[in-house]
Amino acid sequence: MATRFSQMRYRFMFSALILVAILTLIKQRSKLAGAFSSQAGVNLHGILQTTSKNLNECSSTRPPTGSNGAVNHLLQSIATTSNYFIDYPLPASEFAKMGKRLQVLRDWIEACQSLRHQITPEQANTLHNHIDDTVLASLPFLRNPTKPSASSISHLRESFRPESRGILIPTGQKTFRYACHLISNLRDALDSRLPIEVVYAGDSELPSSHRDFISSLGSEITTVDILQVFNDTTLDLQPGGWAIKTFAALGSQYEQVLVLDADAVLLQAPETILDRHQGEALSKSHVYNEGYAEECDSGLVVLDKSRLPILLGLMHACWQNTKEVRDAWTYVMGHGDKESWWFGFELSGAKYTFEDHYGGMLGSMDADNARVCSFTIAHFDEKDKLLWYNGSLLKNKLVNATEFDIPTHYMLDGVWEKGAAKKDMSCMKGGKLKEVSKEEREILRSSVEKAKDLDARMEHIVTSED
C-alpha cells in the first residue's frame, strides 16, 4: 500500500490549467476560473517530461561502491549541494523544484542507509547533519516546538510506531459535531476498533470541554494539538481550515494512517480501506488527459509513512499548505488542500493511486426517475459498492442543521448537473444507477440514530461556545 485518494469528477469551478501553471513554473498568476483549455490537457504529459529534464539542479546521489575515496567524494558532493539548497531557498511558486529537491534528499537518506556498514561514525554524523540542515532549511515547520533536540527527519521517522495503523480526524469547533458523528459511525455502526486521533490547532480551536467529550466516546480515542508537534511560525494553522490535514498525517504516531474529513460518512469498515493496493494514477487522470477541473476529493486519504517516497511526498504536500504557499498559489489555483496531495506525490516521484471512479451522486431519484439528486458526493470501491460520502449525515448541512437523511439510490460515471451555489442541490444523469442496499441503509440508520443521541448529549457544549 502506498497512497490512496478519493476522486471527484467536476467540469466546473477551477481550471485544469492549475497543473500547467505549476509544472511549467509560470511566474505570472492568473485567475483560473472559466472554461477549460483542451490544449492544456493534451500538452501536460510533454510538460511533465520537459520539466523533469530542465530541473536538474544537481545530479542524483546514488550510493557509491568501492574505496573510501569514493565515499569522501560523495560526502563532499552532498555538502556542496546541501549548502546550495540552504543558500538558495525556493520561492512559493517553485512546486516542481521542491519535488526535485525532495527526490535528491531521498537519495541521500537511502545512501546513508546503504552505507551504514562502510562509513565511519564521523562520516555518518556528517551525512545526517547535512540531511537535517537541508530539510529544516526547506521545511522549517519540522522544528519541534516542545523538543528542539528532536527536530530532524530521523526523529520524525522514529516517532512512528512500526506497523501501526490509525484514523485521523482533523477538526475544530466548527466541525466538532460532525467529528463526533463520524466517530460514532466508525465505532458503533461499522464496529471499527482502529485507534482514532482527533487533531486540532490550539485550545481556542478545540477547548477542553470539547476534547473531554470526544475522549468519552470510546476507548483508544485521543486528541492531539498539532501546534505541539510542528512549529507554527510558517503555518498559521490556528485559524482553522484545510491546511491542518496534511500536518495531521505527517505528525501522527501511526505509520499507516487514514485521514478523514470530519463530515465524512463511511459505508465500509476503515480496516478494509487500509488493506487496498496501490496502482498507477497519472496516466488515467481525467485532468491530465481530458480536461476535468479537479482530480481529488481529499476527504479520505490513506498513507503508509514507512515508505520513504511517501513520507517525502507528504512533506511536499505539507509545504504546499504552509501559509505563504497556500495563500499565494495552492488555495488560489485549487480548492483548498485537495490537489496538494496529488501534486506532492506526483512531483516528488512517489507512487500513489486513486479510486477507480470519479465522484458519483448518492441521494434520491427525481420525479422522472432519470436522475439521482442530493447535496453530497459518493465514492466507490473496486466492486462499485458504496465506500463513503462527504457532507455529513445531514441532508443539507448548509441549509438545515437538524434534518438527517438516509439516501435510497446512487449513480456513478454519469453527467453532473451542478446546483447554482454550494448550498443548492446537484444531480447526476446517464450513469450506472444502483439502489442503496439493505445493509447500507442499516449502517446509515444506525449512524443517524447515534448522531441524534450525541446531539442531545453535546448540546450544552456546543451552545456554551456560540
Image: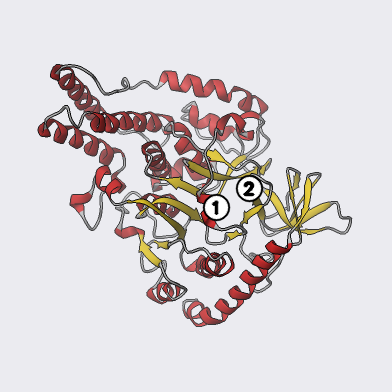
The residue tagged 1 is 272
The residue tagged 2 is 381
Of badges 1 and 2, nearer the viewer stands: 1
Report helix, strand or loop for mark 2.
loop
User: How many labels sit on residues?
Assistant: 2
Characterize the local packing of mark 1: few (<14), some (14-19) or many (20 or more) Cα atoms within 10 angstroms: few
| Amino acid type shown at disc 1 | Thr
* CB contact under 8 Å: marks 1 and 2: yes
In terms of image quadrants, where is residue 205? bottom left
Q: Position of residue 68 (x, y in %)?
A: 13, 20
Left or right: 68, with 429 as reference point: left
Residue at the right extreme, as displayed:
368
Look at the picture and state if 308 lies above or below 444.
Answer: above
- The mark found on residue 406 in the picture is none
- Residue at horizontal 48%, vertical 79%? 461
Q: Position of residue 430 (x, y in %)?
A: 81, 44
